[in-house]
Amino acid sequence: MNERAPRLSPEEGMFRLAGTDASWICVHTCPTPRCPCRTALVLATHKGRETLEARGAPVWQAWMSGGRYREAAHEVADKCADIIVFGLDIDTAQEQQSDRDDPLDLAQYPRSPLS
């Protein structure tokens, strides 16, 4: 465990979206205290909490260990069609692609939680 990263349970940062029992998101900011990045990482699914927990486990484990959690999120996005992964700029509320700072085209995700 990275001593700089806070200890969280897998349930922290996980929220059910209003209007449906199956839509869930998991949101975490950078685990480094006082990091200037100002970006939160978001994982989302319409397949329920259990799917989000199972598919997002590698991201959570990397986040908790101080590892490369953004790379883990990119791998999850590539392998799991039922998970949407993106960044969210905390100051502008602009969605970003998970692996770079380019804006995310939400039209690619018609059932996206933010569209």
Image (cartoon, rainbow, N blue to C red):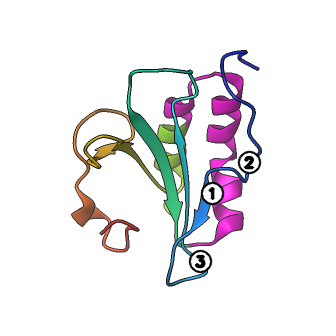
Q: Give the image location of residue 35, x and y in percent.
A: 46, 21
Q: Is residue 12 above or below residue 81?
A: above
Q: Residues within 10 Å of mark 1 (few under 14, many from 20)?
A: some
User: Can residue 42 be found in the magenta stretch?
Assistant: no
Quick check: can you spot residue 23?
yes
Q: Give the image location of residue 77, x and y in percent.
A: 48, 48
Identified at 32% across, 66% down, the residue is 109
Name the residue tied to disc 2. 10
Element type where label 2 sits in the image? loop
Name the residue tied to disc 3. 22
Q: Amino acid at mark 3?
A: Ala
Q: Quadrant of residue 8?
A: top right
In this rendered view, identify the residue nearer to me: 84 or 115: 115
Q: Earlier in the sequence, mark 3 or mark 1?
A: 1
Q: Which stretch is magenta?
A: 47-72
Identified at 59% across, 77% down, the residue is 22
Q: CA distance from mark 1 to mark 2?
A: 8 Å
Considering the whole magenta stretch, tell me its main secondary structure: helix
In what quadrant of the picture does the N terminus appear?
Answer: top right
In this rendered view, identify the residue nearer to me: 62 or 94: 94
Q: Nearest to the eye among marks 2 and 3: give it.
A: 2
In this rendered view, identify the residue nearer to me: 34 or 51: 34
Q: CA distance from mark 3 to mark 1?
A: 13 Å
Q: Give the image location of residue 30, x and y in percent.
A: 51, 30
Q: Amino acid at mark 2?
A: Pro
Identified at 50% across, 20% down, the residue is 34
Residue 14 has which mark? 1
Q: Is residue 99 above or below residue 4?
A: below
